[in-house]
Image (cartoon, helix red, strand yellow):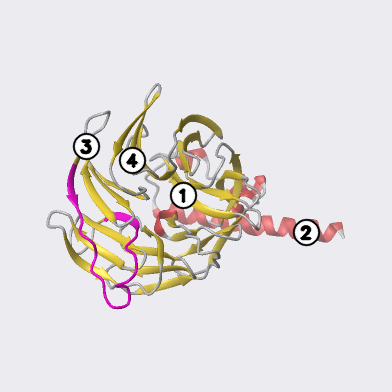
Amino acid sequence: MSLRYKPRWRLQEHSNVITCLAFSPHGTYIAAGGVDGKLSIWSYDLGRLLYVVSGHAGVLSLSWIGPSEQSLLCGLQDGTVLSVEIDQSLTATGYFAHQYPVECISISGDTVATGAHKEVHVWEFRERGANWRRVSKLDLPPSVGSNRSDEIIVTSLHWARTKYSPNTLLVSYMHHGIAFWDISSRMILHFISVKTLVASTSLSPRHQYLAVSSIHNGFDIYDLNSDAPIMSFNQPTSKGICIPVLFAHHGFAVLGGSTEGKARLWAIETGNLIHTLHHSDDDTIQAIAAHYDASGDRFMIATGSHSPNDKHYIQLWHAQDIYRDNIPARLMTLLSPPAQLQDHHNMSWTHWIAWFIFLFIGFILSWLFVYWKDKTSI
C-alpha cells in the first residue's frame, strides 16, 4: 500500500494561533483550541462547525475522554480545566486547577494528570458537574549542575505501561529530561537524560517508544526499554518555537509540525520521508492530530496553521492509496474473485493455487494488452 495525503477541508473559525488539535475516539469530530479563547468542534466528514465555546482565556491543551465521543477536557491559560459534555446540546464546567497555564493533559481511566509550568497534579476525575478530587501533587524533579539554574517547565504528560509500573506517568521537562513517576508513592522510578531542550513528546501506541521534539533540531525516537535514541529526523525550526511531534499509522510513522509550512511524515523503521503536507512556506504549524478509522480503513490528519498575515486555519487531510487509485477499472474487476469464491470460506489449497495462477495470467494478459495498444498507436 502506498499512501498519499490529500487536502479534504480547510476550516476557519479562530482569530489567533491554534494551539491544540484532537480527533475524537472514533474520528467523528476534530476539536481545536486557540489563543483566542475558543474551543471549536467540527465534523470531519462534513467539514462543518458544530460547536464553539468562547472564553477570555486561551485554550492550550485538550484531550477526549474515551471511548465515547461525548466528553473532553481542555486546559486554559488562566489555570482552569474545562470539562465539556456533548449531548443534544453542549455544556462546559470549569475547575480551577493550577496557578499557571494548563499546557498538558493526560487521561487514564478516571485519573487525570495536568501539567502547568513546573506543576504536575493528579486528579480523580468526575463527569457531568461533580467535583474533582486532587489525589497527588508531584514534587519538582532533581537538578544537576548542567540544569540547576534552568527553569522547571513541564512540556508533556503520558500514562504508560513500563517495566517499572503498569501505570507510570511519564513527565517531560524542557530542561530536566524525562521522569518516570509512580503516583502512589510520588517517587521517580527512572529517569532519561535528554541532551536537548524538549519542546514536546509523543508516546507510541504500544508504549515502546517516545518521540521527542527538540526546540532546535528536529525529532528523536527513544526506546523506553533501553533509554537509547534509535532514530533521528531533521526538521528545521526557527524562532525558538515549540513544534509538536506525534506518532501516527499505528506507531509506524511519526508526524512533525513545522515553522516553514511543511508538516512531514516519516517511517520509523527506515527513517524515510513518507509524505510532506504542504501549507504556505511562511506558515507555522504548531498543532497536529492523526487518527485511523478502522471501520472505514481511513487515515486522517489535521494540522493547525498560522501565517505572518494573521491567517489561522485547520487543514484536514485524508490518505489515498495511489497505487490502487491508478489501477484501470478492468484490471480491478479482474483482480476481484468471483462471488462463489468469496462466499466459499473452506476452499482447499488446490483451489487457492488455481486462483493465484489465474491472477498471474491476468496480470500478464493486461500488461501485454497495454504494451500492444501502445505499440499500435505509434
User: In the image, residue 201 lies at what x, y percent?
Assistant: 38, 60
Q: Earlier in the sequence, mark 2 or mark 4?
A: 4
Q: Residue at x 84, y 58 (%)?
A: 376
- In three-dimensional space, the C-alpha distance between marks 3 and 1, rounded to whole angstroms, equals 30 Å
Q: Magenta part of the protein: which range?
A: 134-159
Disc 3 secondary structure class: loop
Q: Earlier in the sequence, mark 3 or mark 1?
A: 3
Q: Which residue is label 3 attached to?
A: 132
**Mark number for residue 290?**
1
Which of labels 3 and 1 is toward the front? 3
Q: Amino acid at mark 3?
A: Trp
Crowd tier of the residue under label 3, counting other residues whose Cα lies within 10 Å: few below 14, some 14–19, many 20 or above: some
Taking depth in this image into account, of 181 and 94 the one nearest to the observer is 94
User: In the image, residue 180 lies at what x, y percent?
Assistant: 23, 63
Disc 4 secondary structure class: strand
**Mark number for residue 80?**
4
Q: Amino acid at mark 2?
A: Trp
Crowd tier of the residue under label 4, counting other residues whose Cα lies within 10 Å: few below 14, some 14–19, many 20 or above: many
Q: Quadrant of the C terminus?
A: bottom right
Disc 2 secondary structure class: helix
Tell me, yes or no, whether the two marked residues, 4 and 1, touch with CB atoms within 8 Å.
Answer: no
User: In the image, residue 232 lies at what x, y percent?
Assistant: 45, 72
Q: Earlier in the sequence, mark 3 or mark 4?
A: 4
Q: List the single residue furthest toward the bottom.
A: 145
Crowd tier of the residue under label 2, counting other residues whose Cα lies within 10 Å: few below 14, some 14–19, many 20 or above: few
**Mark number for residue 372?**
2
- From this view, report whether residue 322 is shown above or below residue 74: below
